[in-house]
């Protein structure tokens, strides 16, 4: 009960007293939502690329002015896939969509559960920080060497930077989760506003 | 010292086999002080195009890499794969000798050292139907692996299609594509007799693999060990080159035995293809100025 | 090797037990093992792998099929599909529970991946089954089990990997998968019938009356199947008609599903919003696990774990059938922490020569490998189909694992039967 009140006070929109911490958490959430939408956009474009590649190949037989192939179709689709995968990661975490084993968590007292949640989130933050740093370094190396793809001569640091950004945001969301766990706030929020016919949680 | 050696090709491929041979000889020459574990089939998770970086960063101490796949990082490594620039074993030797100092510098720059180089059999065209005249290219929906290949076949009039290897077999089976350009080795790896009836021996492109060692790993060896390994590499390289020629002959025979008809390229076809190929040489020089000297010396040497 | 394997299990199970997200736990285990036991720039390795895996073009069908499943979930397609099938299901004990197995068998002919098959069929069928009041255990278990058919019934991504590595005809492998695939589906259906006959309460009251429908009603109901059949025909047609590769056919599936949804007037802004976000969430969930599993897989390869065990198996000099028995156990153990592709790539160089020396055909072994990889998909702690179903239902992994257990047992027995009667596998490719 107390927990929910605390949550409402800090998280409610436009409340009179909003701590800098709550603002930071909200900012991360806003970025996460934006990222999720960018992920959806990437998914839609990758579908479009695959269809376009196929259509070009089939139609060019009959339509003389069409190019015989869309050489970037597969390559760019794969970049968009990487972007979809990483951009969605933070939002999936926020909505509780990443798979985990809850055997221990479900048997603990609320206090102990919070403690374990803090610990687990901090482990995740540590690993994701390493992960983000590794990808950043990787991207910078590609940039410094002006590495190109062999399929289309595209500078690969661009899609790599996109993936790095997605992973950075996942790290931030894990950090936000650790903070929420410490501050005894609700950890997860559904991605959809309305409860629909989904079987999730039934 | 125990070194992992990353090989992206299947264990049965002759590059994997020559790697095994090299490993055995190195163990013998260093009395077991240096052992190389060949990890074929991409077992370590490396697919090929990142191999230069993988050896550079010390992710694997030794790796074998297709030069033509490293052009994203070092465009000059594509020099020997220009269409119709290099078309015979002796020309392969000439270009390798001429380009080797430049390759060595590139390897040095990427924190590695070349141990030996082995050619691939030439790139041919596997197709469901026979291409008899230049117009025949228009009916080809051909799988290519990179931008250069796509550009070349587009200019020949074909419809190139870049797709991942995993899609090639279903695509050939259902007719999404009707041809593939690759070497006799890869044709056997992909069991192409299941789908294609003709192999056009056009040999439009040469490819090379180089086996390199990470410099940090190399410097951990004693001078005696280094010398022993260099000697093994030097001694085996000519053998591997002979084996490469033999490999092409064997694989072509195998394909032929399995029912793939070998089509010798006729003069009209060859002239047509070469005419489309030669402008690429100058275009390459314009893009990679360092290639100018090598290509000029090479053309003088082979009178092309 | 013992300290390596010991730390692997300690780190992996320890982090999973305290609730570290599965994908992260896998990646973390692989990374830590390399830090401890190998002198490597692990950061560069992890970054390179991540890039390689996330941009693997062979994976492209997965996000596309996930998207297709989300679109279908927002249409009336599943309800009309069930309305069409219900009078026919009345003929079988188990009623509509067979929809999972039949649906997976059909979708397996479209998709080369087991996770995609489970996700799409689950998205369409599971909600409807539960809404109609069928028991969760059979609904979930049969979905997890039958979802693995995605690899066995062609096209199959696993067979392509195996065919290239073992230099076996992929076409013959595809052919070899058909009969075992149908037989395994039949075994699943028989079990569903037995199980639902023993536990009558698993079938809701209303559905038991389905046996009393007339044949006229059955045939009239067929028109409800039209949208689903049309979509399947569309995807299969573009693929087998030579217009699309398997991954491109998945994109056709998305467009087809959108078309159905639009024709039914259900493609509202709100629906599009839910489709988009739902698909991205599922993609990200599965991708994190794929990524973690691949990082751990590569770490295991660097540490030589699978090879060491395979070499040990070789040293035992077993009789052919005992060898297969031991290999099943070996792959079950590997499947605890590795995903299918890593398992094949790492063990094949050692396992294939042993098996062919014992007199087995490489094509037969390809089907064997597909079966053990499928088992790895449905046993814990790392089982992709289990994760996919957790994503679909939010049930605990323990419950899903228990519900799936009978199907795992069926698959093990089925695999051993294939070892006793290898001609079941080899007949079709030989007579092609
Ligand atoms: Na399939
Ligand atoms: Na498993």
Image (spheres, rainbow, N blue to C red):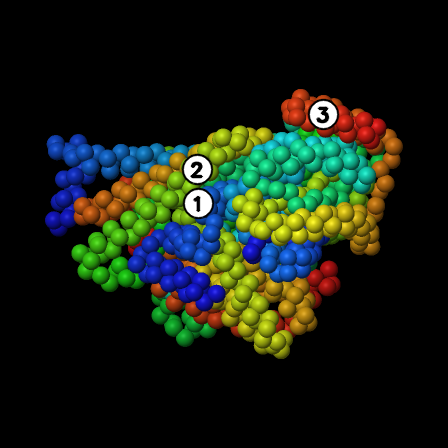
Q: In which quarter of the image is residue C207?
A: bottom left
The quarter of the rendered structure image containing the N terminus of chain B is: bottom right
Judging by the rendered image, the residue that carries numbered circle 3 is B293
Q: Are marks 2 and 3 in contact (CB under 8 Å)?
A: no
**In the image, is the residue at mark 3 within 8 Å of ligand 1 by its beta carbon?**
no
Q: Are marks 1 and 2 in contact (CB under 8 Å)?
A: yes
The residue that appears at 57% across and 47% down in the rendered structure is B218
What is the spatial separation of the Cα atoms under label 2 and label 3, in whole angstroms?
A: 35 Å
Q: Mark 1 lies on which chain?
A: C
Give the structural element (helix, strand or loop) at label 3: helix
**Above or below — where is C418 with respect to C293?**
below
Is label 2's Cβ within 8 Å of ligand 2?
no
Q: Is residue C416 left or right of residue C262?
A: right
Q: For this view, does C106 lie left or right of residue B87?
A: left
Tell me if residue B222 comes above or below residue C17 in the rendering: above
Quarter occupied by the C terminus of chain B? top right
Q: What crowding class fits label 1: few (fewer than 14 Cα within 10 Å), some (14-19), or many (20 or more)?
A: many
What secondary structure is marked by label 2?
helix
Q: Marks 1 and 2, Cα distance to the nearest angstrom?
A: 9 Å
* Residue A33 in view in this figure: yes
**In the rendering, at what x and y percent does residue C394 appear?**
34, 55
Label 2 resides on the chain identified as A
Residue depicted at 80% across the width and 41% down the height: B89
Q: Position of residue B207 (x, y in %)?
A: 71, 40
Identify the residue at image location x=55%, y=30%.
A154
Asked whether the residues under marks 1 and 2 belong to the same chain, the reply is: no
Tell me the tag on residue B74.
Answer: none
Q: Quadrant of residue A167?
A: top left
Disc 1 is placed on an element classified as helix
Q: Is residue C49 left or right of residue B223?
A: left
Q: Name the residue under label 2.
A: A137
What number is the disc on residue C43? Answer: 1
């Amino acid at each position: 009960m107390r927990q929910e009140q605390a949550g409402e006070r800090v998280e409610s929109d436009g409340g009179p007293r909003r701590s800098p911490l709550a603002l930071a958490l909200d900012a991360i959430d806003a970025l996460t939502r934006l990222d999720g939408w960018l992920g959806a956009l990437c998914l839609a474009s990758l579908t479009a690329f695959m269809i376009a590649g196929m259509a070009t190949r089939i139609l060019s037989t009959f339509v003389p002015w069409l190019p015989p192939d869309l050489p970037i179709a597969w390559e760019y689709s794969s970049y968009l896939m990487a972007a979809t995968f990483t951009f969605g990661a933070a939002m999936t975490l926020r909505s509780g969509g990443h798979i985990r084993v809850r055997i221990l968590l479900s048997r603990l007292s609320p206090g102990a559960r919070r403690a374990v949640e803090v610990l687990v989130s901090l482990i995740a933050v540590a690993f994701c920080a390493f992960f983000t740093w590794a990808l950043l370094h990787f991207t910078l190396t590609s940039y410094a060497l002006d590495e190109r793809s062999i399929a289309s001569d595209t500078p690969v640091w661009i899609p790599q930077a996109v993936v790095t950004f997605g992973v950075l945001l996942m790290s931030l969301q894990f950090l936000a989760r650790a903070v929420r766990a410490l501050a005894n706030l609700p950890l997860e929020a559904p991605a959809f506003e309305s409860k629909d016919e989904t079987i999730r949680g039934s | 010292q125990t070194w992992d050696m990353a090989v992206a090709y299947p264990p049965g491929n002759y590059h994997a086999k020559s790697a095994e041979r090299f490993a055995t000889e190195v163990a013998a020459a260093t009395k077991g002080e240096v052992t190389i574990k060949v990890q074929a089939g991409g077992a370590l998770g490396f697919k090929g195009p990142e191999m230069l970086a993988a050896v550079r960063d010390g992710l694997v101490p030794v790796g074998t890499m297709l030069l033509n796949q490293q052009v994203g990082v070092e465009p000059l490594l594509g020099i020997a794969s220009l269409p119709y620039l290099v078309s015979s074993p002796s020309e392969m030797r000439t270009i390798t000798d001429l380009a080797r100092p430049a390759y060595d510098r590139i390897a040095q720059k990427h924190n590695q050292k070349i141990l030996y180089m082995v050619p691939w059999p030439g790139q041919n065209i596997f197709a469901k139907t026979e291409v008899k005249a230049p117009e025949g290219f228009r009916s080809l929906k051909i799988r290519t692996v990179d931008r250069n290949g796509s550009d070349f076949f587009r200019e020949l009039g074909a419809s190139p299609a870049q797709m991942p290897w995993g899609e090639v077999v279903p695509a050939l089976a259902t007719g999404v594509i009707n041809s593939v350009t690759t070497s006799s080795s890869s044709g056997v790896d992909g069991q192409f007799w299941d789908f294609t009836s003709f192999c056009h021996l056009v040999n439009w492109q040469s490819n090379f693999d180089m086996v390199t060692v990470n410099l940090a790993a190399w410097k951990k060896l004693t001078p005696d060990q280094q010398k022993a390994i260099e000697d093994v590499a030097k001694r085996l390289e000519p053998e591997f080159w002979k084996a490469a020629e033999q490999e092409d002959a064997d694989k072509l025979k195998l394909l032929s035995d399995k029912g793939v008809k070998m089509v010798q390229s006729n003069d009209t076809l060859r002239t047509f293809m070469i005419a489309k190929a030669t402008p690429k040489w100058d275009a390459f020089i314009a893009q990679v100025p360092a290639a100018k000297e090598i290509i000029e010396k090479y053309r003088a040497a082979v009178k092309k | 090797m013992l300290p390596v394997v010991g730390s692997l299990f300690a780190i992996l199970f320890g982090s999973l037990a305290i609730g570290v997200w599965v994908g992260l736990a896998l990646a973390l285990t692989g990374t830590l093992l390399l830090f401890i036991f190998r002198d490597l720039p692990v950061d560069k390795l992890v970054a390179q792998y991540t890039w390689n895996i996330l941009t693997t073009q062979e994976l492209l069908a997965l996000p596309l099929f996930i998207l297709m499943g989300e679109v279908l979930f927002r249409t009336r397609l599943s309800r009309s599909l069930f309305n069409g099938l219900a009078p026919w299901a009345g003929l079988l004990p188990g009623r509509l529970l067979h929809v999972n197995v039949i649906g997976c068998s059909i979708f397996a002919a479209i998709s080369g991946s087991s996770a995609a098959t489970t996700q799409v069929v689950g998205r369409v069928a599971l909600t409807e089954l539960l809404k109609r009041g069928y028991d969760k255990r059979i609904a979930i278990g049969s979905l997890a089990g039958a979802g693995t058919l995605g690899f066995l019934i062609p096209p199959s991504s696993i067979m392509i990997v195996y065919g290239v590595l073992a230099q076996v005809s992929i076409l013959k492998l595809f052919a070899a998968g058909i009969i075992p695939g149908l037989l395994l589906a039949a075994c699943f259906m028989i079990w569903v019938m037995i199980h639902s006959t023993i536990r009558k309460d698993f079938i809701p009251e209303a559905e038991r009356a389905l046996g009393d429908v007339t044949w006229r009603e059955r045939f009239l109901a067929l028109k409800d199947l039209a949208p689903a059949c049309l979509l399947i025909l569309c995807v299969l047609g573009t693929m087998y008609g030579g217009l699309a590769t398997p991954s491109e056919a998945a994109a056709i599936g998305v467009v087809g599903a959108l078309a159905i949804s639009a024709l039914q007037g259900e493609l509202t802004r709100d629906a599009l919003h839910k489709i988009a976000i739902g698909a991205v969430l599922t993609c990200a969930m599965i991708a994190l696990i794929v990524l973690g599993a691949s990082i751990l897989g590569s770490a295991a390869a660097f540490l030589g774990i699978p090879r060491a065990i395979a070499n040990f198996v070789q040293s035992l000099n077993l009789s052919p059938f005992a060898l297969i028995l031991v290999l099943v156990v070996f792959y079950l153990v590997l499947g605890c922490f590795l995903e299918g592709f890593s398992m094949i790539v790492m063990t094949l160089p050692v396992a294939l020569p042993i098996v062919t020396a014992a007199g087995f055909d490489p094509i037969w072994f390809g089907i064997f490998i597909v079966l053990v990889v499928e088992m790895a998909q449905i046993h814990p702690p790392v089982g992709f189909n289990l994760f996919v179903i957790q994503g679909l239902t939010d049930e605990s992994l323990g419950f899903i694992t228990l519900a799936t257990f009978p199907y795992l047992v069926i698959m093990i027995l089925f695999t051993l039967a294939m070892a006793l009667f290898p001609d079941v596998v080899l007949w079709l490719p030989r007579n092609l």
